[in-house]
Amino acid sequence: MKIKVSKCVFNSTHVSEYQDLQLMSHLAEIGDFQLPTSHLYAYTPLINSHDHLVGNWLPKAGKNRPYPTTDIWVEEMKTSPSYLERNKVWFNDGKFNLLKGNAKLLTTLGIYKNIFSGCHVVQDHAPNQKKSYYEQFPIYVPENYRQCHSISLGNWWGGKSARSEWKSTKGKMPFILHLAEGTNEKARSAFGIFERLNLLKPNSLIIHGIALVPPEIKKCAQVGTSICCCPESNLFLIGRTIDIPACMEYGVNLVLGTDSTMSGSFNLLAELKIFHREYPQIAARDIYRFITENAARALMLPEPYGRLSETTSELLLLEPKDDDPFQNLLQVEIPDIALLVHKGTPIYGDAILLSGFKIKEDNYYFFSLSGRQKFVIGHPEKIIDKVDSLLGYHKEFHYIPF
Ligand SMILES: [Zn+2]
């Protein structure tokens, strides 16, 4: 089902001002049905460029932070109370088969974390899984990518060497790896190795890049290599992020990600607020670009990802909390998402907006939030019940709003 989004609300100044982002508002129609959304802002849904869906357990791990490199944290994390508690639900036998055992309970929780922050795409950084893994979710988890965990630790969780993984992309899909996630000599030397391995390519997506110096960031911008910043994860584990002003100065294709909740904040909306707090000089419209257009480029996604068009099957409607729709994104919370639509299917939002869609109510969970009746696709409440029964007590996941 296609939804018609009218650009009737912004005056001409606003329309031309926002045209580069294809941000239009405030009226959405579904077929003949006009949504009662005249007071809402319309956006293309958001893209989370870095997550580990299976890893969204709480609380965070990091008793000896700040770390000179997360290579230390990766090992230490495996003995943290959080990780050991998660093992009771899904024990990772080291093979990272995310279709085995109870992995689906965890990966689906990760999907809901993203749904409740307005994302219709999430990049799941894990060893490549079978096709059916990527097809099971109600939002888009891209299947086409190759990866390496990191230069310093190699592909310890599965996959071939960084060089052979890049080769198998043939330049036609993103190659993703954690790089320079720290401040010590090992982290500082990672970019040089990355370059010597001939991985500095337009289809490479560097996650974190904390230790990169301006000349290295400039090279990324010149080649077209994308960089993903995960603000809370970087600040929490290392105490700093990549040199964001240098990324902006050289025009690198910068994107944002959450990382897992074992180190990051609880969702992408929270990451936007943290990024804005750390870098208030960066315009809200640029931040919007990081999680839409830039992300679609980094992940090499086809149309319509990253842009809102007048007729679309991808839509995010938000309550207005600010006169500026870009500033608005930095203020909204989970309850302020009025509607998230993916492939023409309503995913999450206000129950009152469901009336324009042909849906089966059994396929949705309904709940009350901040005095409003909300719906979400699927049955997350059953997942939480199952997790609770495996643990023998109730477990809170703060990114699930009920
Ligand atoms: Zn990560």
Image (spheres, rainbow, N blue to C red):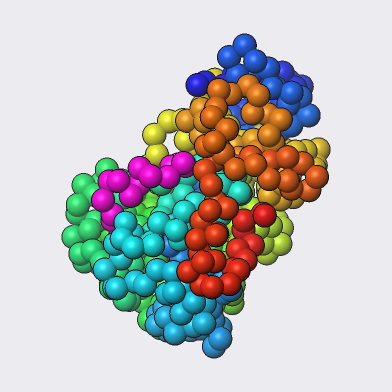
- Residue sitting nearer the eye, 351 or 222: 351
Question: What residue sits 31% from the left and 60% below the top?
Answer: 100
Residue 340 in the image: above or below residue 115: above
Towards the viewer: 30 or 175: 30
In the picture, residue 297 is in which quadrant? top left
Is 61 located above or below residue 47 in the figure? below
Residue 221: x and y, percent? 43, 53
Q: Is residue 265 above or below residue 74?
A: above
Which residue shows up at 58% across the image and 23% down it? 357
Position of residue 194 measured from the top left corner of the image (x, y, whole percent): 30, 66
Per the image, is 133 magenta? Answer: yes
In the image, is 210 to the left or to the right of 223?
right
What residue is drawn where x is 54% and y is 36%? 362
Hey, which quadrant is residue 79 in on the image? bottom left
Q: How far from the left and from the top, in percent, is residue 236?
A: 59, 75
Where does the magenta region start and end? 127-140
Q: Is residue 315 visible?
A: yes
Q: Is residue 292 magenta?
A: no
Tally of marks: 0
Q: 112 or 185, which is in the foreground?
A: 112
Question: Residue, x 47% and y 42% (percent of image)?
Answer: 139
Q: Is residue 220 visible?
A: no
Furthest residue in direction top, as rendered = 32
Which of these two is toward me, 31 or 247? Answer: 31
- Displayed quadrant of residue 195: bottom left
Give the main secondary structure of the magenta stretch: loop
In x, y percent, where is residue 364?
A: 56, 39
Q: Quadrant of the C terminus?
A: bottom right
